[in-house]
Amino acid sequence: MERRKRESAESSRGRLTVLAALVVLTLAEYVVGVKVAPNLSLLLLFMLAQAALIIWYSMELPKLWRRDEEEEI
Amino acid sequence: MTVHAEPRRETVNRLGLWLFFCSEFFLFAALFAARFYLAGPYHAKVNQPLGLAITLVLLVSGFTAYRAEAGIRRGDRSAFLRNLLVTILLGLVFLAGVGVEWATAEFAPSSIFGTAFFTMTGVHASHVLSGVVAFALAYRLGLRGHFSAERHWGVEALVKYWYLIDVVWVFFFPVLYLVRA
């Protein structure tokens, strides 16, 4: 139980970091889009960075190929 | 002779879920491409601050959804239910924002950009609505004692689905609200 709580707290901190990164990227994207240069290629960089963060860390894509035993640990 | 162990049920479930996500990505990618095919990089006057606000709301709701999953994973039912409720509320705020945007849009739905805008936001909002309904069902089941630290696949799948909605919006927000020729 204690181990689960500790892991959960660590994981929460990680997710909070990802959320902070997403918020920063969104705000930067907004500033670029409204004030600087709203062209697709530049905005695409922001989109891809945000999507990669969510898919990798939040949707836990690596779990797809992680072996079952590794998950048990 | 090598003997391979049977994959666990969760592993198979995850694979099935990701195949479903792939089919969803194709749907949204088609809408993404159609927006540029129809209207090019042009966009009509849209409420950009409102678009930014609902984007941030959706991103935060992803975190609260994760907190709900983490709660049930460690057997903390009250944290699970509390975070689920916050996620539902944030989902409703997002839908309200889309509703305001629709009600105050200064372009006709039948215009070229309007067709792309209302179709993309409409299909996305219908996914948000289905996620909110599913969260509400999970909340009700949670109140009745369903889900536990050992059995919470339904919650995990739902939270991942919610993140899929986040990913789609990450692409839709800039192409509907920011990009210009």
Image: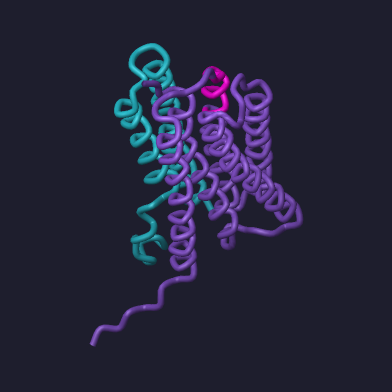
Chain colours: A cyan, B purple
Q: Is residue B53 magenta?
A: yes
User: Would residue B139 be counted in the magenta stretch?
Assistant: no
Q: Residue at x 43, y 51 (%)?
A: B26
Residue B110 appears at what percent x and percent y?
60, 32
The one of B64 and B135 positioned closer to us in this rendering: B135
Residue B2 x/y as whole percent: 25, 83
Taking the image as shown, residue B32 lies to the left or right of residue B156, namely left
Q: Nearer the viewer, residue B154 or A50?
A: A50
Nearer to me, B94 or B78: B94
Q: Position of residue B79 (x, y in %)?
A: 64, 43
Assign the N terminus of chain B to one quadrant of the image: bottom left
Boundaries of the magenta span: B46-55
Question: A11 or B29: which is nearer to us?
Answer: B29
The residue under the point 40% across, 60% down is A71
In the image, residue A25 sits, relative to residue A52, either above or below, namely: above
Q: Quadrant of the C terminus of chain B?
A: top left
Horizontal side, residue B78 vs residue B19: left or right: right
x then y, percent, for residue B158: 57, 52
Q: Looking at the image, which residue sits at the far top?
A: A35
When the figure is inspected, residue B38 is found, relative to residue B150, above or below; the finding is above
Dominant secondary structure, magenta = helix
User: Residue at the left extreme?
Assistant: B1
Left or right position of B29 against B131: left
Q: Residue at x 44, y 43 (%)?
A: A11
Residue drawn at x 47%, y 40% as measured from the top left: B168
Q: How many marks?
A: 0
Left or right of A33 in this view: B106: right
